[in-house]
Amino acid sequence: MESNAVLATLQPNYNILSPSRFYSSSSSAATTFLSVFYPQRTRFSPPQYLKLDKQVLASASCRYAHEVKSPFKNAAVLSDSYSSEASELADIEWDNLGFGLLPTDYMYMMKCSQGGNFSKGELQRFGNIELNPSAGVLNYGQGLFEGLKAYRKEDGNILLFRPEENALRMRQGAERMCMPAPTVDQFVEAVKETVLANKRWVPPPGKGSLYIRPLLMGSGAVLGLAPAPEYTFLIYVSPVGNYFKEGVAPINLIVEHELHRATPGGTGGVKTIGNYAAVLKAQSAAKAKGYSDVLYLDCVHKKYLEEVSSCNIFVVKGDVISTPAIKGTILPGITRKSIIDVARSQGFQVEERFVPVDELLDADEVFCTGTAVVVSPVGSITYKGKRVSYGVDGFGAVAQQLYSVLTRLQMGLIDDKMDWTVELS
């Protein structure tokens, strides 16, 4: 079994409290707690935890534990012994998952120098990482990230969805950002190891997915503007539910015609971290007005659709599905690519082209795609004060059909004739 092979590399070291049971991103107490019980570069046994003596807890940690808000139902309970398996499900409210970070057990880390190649990485306990204040990623934004998901099947096995596509996109982005990158095989194997080490955090079938976040960053110190001398590849994971608070209900977008997400010749076509900081201003203003997110236009003509803050856009008219062409300012989404292939296999005509904003006015349906949202129906779009609605009953027929095919394939409920999934056991 692949999971046993991965977990066999993790050897017990010493007693530790589960970091995920006492974690709070906003609590300095939690940070202190983790720094005491949670050394960074140590390999541990599979994700089960030793029972600690009550006096140890009282003297070393209980003064912190009561201050930390935990998402777990039984946060004070520690496991009695190590286990050689990671199959037991984590003790959380699976029915109430949102799209937020729940710290898990392990993360993966691999490093290399500028001009070098990444060598074998290792699993470490999830926790804070150390960076020099002059790290390239902190000073000059030299960083990329990816996003993909793992799903649990009814038989307990786990499916990854097109991880090699994420690996290829990261390599393309790394070339643009003057960074070395893991090979496709290194990327995929690292994802497999990380998922299997955190297997108990993969939600039960139909309850959500395990979101996988690979990072590539210039971690070496550099003062002058130049590529960093060292790079870190890191993967962490978190169980998630729906991205939008509406769930699979229609979302409401507003078209932004003054601020822009990307420019020709820039980095809009790669998944660099700076692209996302640039959308926060418009997105925050839109959410304050009650909208779900922002739809951006091109910055030259200010009339062609580009994408939503973190997902691609599709417009349906009859049997024709149109989506903005990839031309350097739009991220080549893997879900976008998959939906195009699924739509064509279902008999739809798909056009990748310049899509004028005016076409929204008489569209039959509009929907978004992305790793986080998968397929999200758009209920309305507001442009220059005019609101256009696309029905009130949830998914349109086309979006529903495509969503059903894609998600059933991702979850292993239908045969994978596309050869897109990778099964772990």
Image (spheres, rainbow, N blue to C red):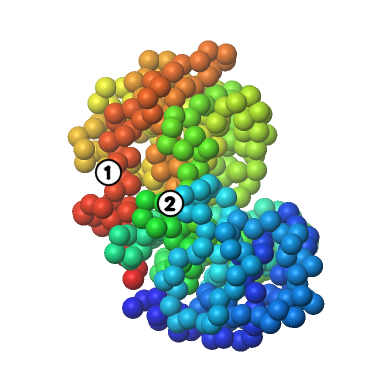
Residue furthest to the top in view is 386
Residue bearing mark 1: 405
Q: Residue at x 49, y 22 (%)?
A: 381
Q: Amino acid at mark 1?
A: Val
Q: Which mark is residue 208?
A: 2
SS assignment at label 1: helix
Report the quarter where the N terminus lies: bottom left
| Residue 129 pos. (x, y %) | 68, 67
Local crowd size for mark 1, using a 10 Å CA cut-off: few (<14), some (14–19), many (≥20):
some
Q: Residue at x 39, y 39 (%)?
A: 375
Report the quarter where the C terminus lies: bottom left
Q: Residue at x 25, y 31 (%)?
A: 349
Q: In terms of depth relative to the viewer, which is nearer, 383 or 424?
A: 424
Q: Is residue 193 visible?
A: no
Q: Amino acid at mark 2?
A: Gly
Q: Is residue 217 visible?
A: yes
Q: In terms of depth relative to the viewer, which is nearer, 180 or 24?
A: 24
| Residue 231 pos. (x, y %) | 62, 67
N-terminal of the two: label 1 or label 2?
A: 2
Position of 195 relative to 267 (above/below) = below
SS assignment at label 2: loop
Which dot, 1 or 2, sits closer to the camera?
2
